[in-house]
Amino acid sequence: MRANVEIRPIAVADEPEWRRLWTLYLEFYESSVSEEVYRTTFSRLTSDHVVGDVSFYEPRGMLALVDGKPVGLVHYFYHRHGWKIEPVCYLQDLYAAPDVRGTGVGRALIEAVYAKADADGCPSVYWMTQEFNTEARKLYDRIATLTPFVKYSR
């Protein structure tokens, strides 16, 4: 089943639905953030911080809507890269509500980031997921290349 998915940038009026979706995303990863992080992140997502031709570092976001209802989100940002002249795009958060998984919502969100990054001169898009996220990885394996890199964190 393919959903009729509309993808659009997150707007200030979307805060309650964005918060609901991002909370579900964080809960999926057994995580949470403070109220200050919610407010700051949403402010960053809905502000315009431009450096030169492209907005760097500040996150951007889009919502997926089915029948006018927000059912998914994506957060991404551009950054400079030591091995490339052009910036690259990091897709940081991707979430589709459980009742729309497998309907094309996740693919539509990723493809919207691909299109926006291409339009902004950032042809490289990358992201990470947890190894146990097997359902999402089925999609990722179809639309991207799995790399051999291992993430370390402090």
Image: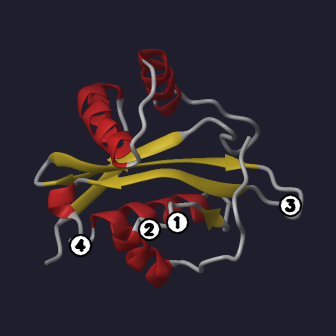
Q: Secondary structure at mark 3?
A: loop
Q: Which residue is mark 4?
A: 102
- Tell me the SS state at disc 2: helix
Residue under the point 43% across and 24% down: 38
Amino acid type assigned to the residue bearing label 1 in the image: Tyr
Sequence order check, earlier mark of 3 and 4: 3
In three-dimensional space, the C-alpha distance between marks 3 and 1, rounded to whole angstroms, equals 18 Å
Distance in Å between CA atoms under marks 2 and 1? 5 Å
CB contact under 8 Å: marks 2 and 1:
yes
Q: Residue furthest left?
A: 67
In three-dimensional space, the C-alpha distance between marks 3 and 4, rounded to whole angstroms, equals 36 Å
Nearest to N terminus: mark 2 or mark 4: 4
Mark 2–mark 4 distance (CA, rounded to whole Å):
15 Å
What percent of the width, then of the height, locates residue 1?
13, 78
Sooner in the amino-acid sequence: mark 3 or mark 1: 3
- The residue lying toward the viewer, choosing from 113 and 50, is 113
Residue for badge 1:
114
**What amino acid type should be assigned to the residue bearing mark 3?**
Ile
